[in-house]
Amino acid sequence: MTADGGTTGEAILEVRDLVKHYPLTRGILFKKQVGAVRAVDGVSFDLRRGETLGIVGESGCGKSTVAKLLVHLERPTSGRIRYKGEDITKLSGRALKAVRRNIQMVFQDPYTSLNPRMTVGDIIGEPFEIHPEAAPKGSRRQKVRELLDVVGLNPEHINRYPHQFSGGQRQRIGIARGLALRPEVIVADEPVSALDVSVQAQVVNLMERLQDTFDLSYVFIAHDLSVVRHISDRVGVMYLGRFAELGTDTQIYDHPTHPYTQALLSAVPVPDPAARERRERILLKGDIPSPANPPSGCRFRTRCWKARAKCAEVVPPLETPTWLRDPPGPAAHPSACHYAEERGILPTEQGPHRADG
Ligand SMILES: Nc1ncnc2c1ncn2[C@@H]1O[C@H](COP(=O)(O)OP(=O)(O)OP(=O)(O)O)[C@@H](O)[C@H]1O
Ligand code: SF4
Ligand SMILES: [Mg+2]
């Protein structure tokens, strides 16, 4: 087990201290910077080959910004991204284009991310226009038909338009487009959030199947912890531009140590009514503070029921707390809390287990 709760294995992406600040300006003619939105403010993680890293957190915590930084739709303010050991943060021109081919994005909203005036054939084949070396012109229609088949759509529907498909089918089109260049990494930004629950499972299952077939590594973003559990090997919980906790699915769901994770878990839907009765609910006070003016010290402190004086003064690092390392159980994983302690939230067979009595 590595420091960030992951298994050992080749890191295909290494993200270190990633920061993205958007300038806040005032004035129309003479723009003056009056501050910055700290959308991402020091995020570090590894993505290992073949694994799925889930990233969850409430709206505005910076998930989409992380996604855009990973696929170079945005340039970071500072920090580093390595792809297979090579620093790709500052690449440009042809070198960047070559790397971008291998790291593709699947977008959230299948209703707005597909151009309504293009046929699905043109949508899925569009990446070949940008990377003609990936498929000679004469073979592209055939490649698109194969992609439609691979994502469970009828290849005969290649000339149809997006409005002729259901939400789930449109997301399959988006996934086919993401696959066209045979990338190694797919960054999926809330790929199922806009879909009905029954359809969500089908799309998640498809993504799992494609992962095995094409040896893909996923960053899978969602605002809901219940959505990512099934597909994720590890999960990072984000709050106000930083990771609060990072660990394997078992560590995060069954042995959470950060108060924010515990609060999020307490809101996860539990289907069994008896189990639901036993589950604790933690209601957070207040709203998420503005990322333009985050609280000092621990960013979660304005909503944390455990906050003490130190929390306002010292930024808690994302590390495995020393007091949870011995004996090394499942609570020993990185948690950015000065007072991290295990507290089982989701009901188990025996009822919720609590380390703090
Ligand atoms: N281009 C931009 N200019 C200024 N601020 C931005 C820009 N893009 C994002 N932000 C701000 O950065 C913060 C993080 O946004 P981001 O879209 O990454 O959050 P998110 O976690 O994806 O939220 P959601 O769950 O709603 O999709 C938000 O406060 C957002 O308003
Ligand atoms: S560091 Fe303090 S405020 Fe932050 S989560 Fe831990 S106890 Fe709460
Ligand atoms: Mg988003």
Image (cartoon, helix red, strand yellow):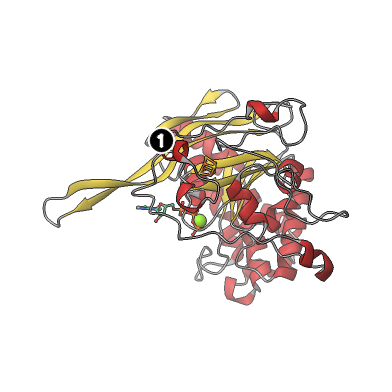
Which of 55 and 142 lies nearest the eye of the viewer? 55
Residue 68 percent across, percent down from the top left: 48, 46
Q: Quadrant of residue 255?
A: top right
Which of 131 and 247 lies nearest the eye of the viewer? 247
Quadrant that contains the N terminus: top right
Q: Is residue 335 left or right of residue 350?
A: left
What residue sits 64% from the left and 63% below the top? 171
As drawn, the residue found furthest toward the top would be 85
Residue 118 percent across, percent down from the top left: 52, 67
What residue sits 48% from the left and 51% below the top? 61
Crowding at dot 1, Cα within 10 Å, few <14 / some 14-19 / many 20+, comes out as few
Q: Quadrant of residue 102?
A: top right
Residue 301 percent across, percent down from the top left: 47, 47
Residue named by callout 1: 313
Q: Is residue 118 left or right of residue 152?
A: left
As drawn, the residue found furthest toward the bottom would be 164
Residue 8 percent across, percent down from the top left: 73, 26
How many numbered marks are there?
A: 1
Quarter of the rendered structure image containing ligand 1: bottom left
The residue type indicated by label 1 comes to Glu
Relative to 20, does residue 114 appear above or below in the rendering? below
Relative to 316, does residue 290 appear above or below in the rendering? below
As drawn, the residue found furthest toward the left would be 29
Which of 336 and 215 lies nearest the eye of the viewer? 336
Q: Tell me, yes or no, if residue 151 can be seen here.
A: yes
Which of 196 and 136 lies nearest the eye of the viewer? 196
